Image (tube, rainbow, N blue to C red):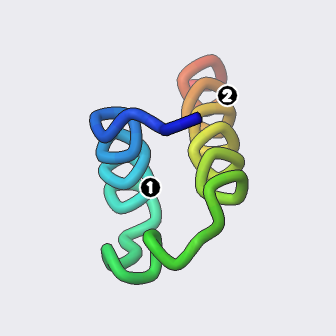
Amino acid sequence: MTYATDRIQEEIAYIAYHFHWTLDDILDLEHGDRRAYARRIAELVTRAGAEG
């Protein structure tokens, strides 16, 4: 199975925007780890919006 390039780019942009990590740091992550970070960021953003 392949992972869509647009989805990878979306995850990279999302993580880079919120964590300010470099492209190389993000690309060094395993696929599952990168997805987990993106999910966790989404949870934090959602929670912050609900509390704000």
Query: How many residues crowd mark 1 within 10 Å: few (<14), some (14–19), many (20+)?
Result: many
From the top left corner, tell me how far across and down residue 13 is, in percent: 30, 50
Q: Which residue is rendered at x = 48% and y = 38% of the image?
A: 3
Report which residue position mark 2 lands on: 47
Q: Which residue is rendered at x = 28% and y = 34% of the image?
A: 6
Which residue type carries mark 1? Answer: Ile
In this rendering, the answer to whether 49 lies above or below 44 is above
Q: Which residue is rendered at x = 67% and y = 28% of the image?
A: 47
- Residue 40's quadrant in the figure? top right
- Residue 7's quadrant in the figure? top left
Which residue type carries mark 2? Answer: Arg
Q: At numbered mark 1, what does the secondary structure look like: helix, strand or loop?
A: helix
Drawn side of residue 11 relative to residue 45, left or right? left
From the top left corner, tell me how far across and down residue 51 is, in percent: 65, 24
Quadrant of the image containing the C terminus: top right
From the top left corner, tell me how far across and down residue 50 is, in percent: 62, 17
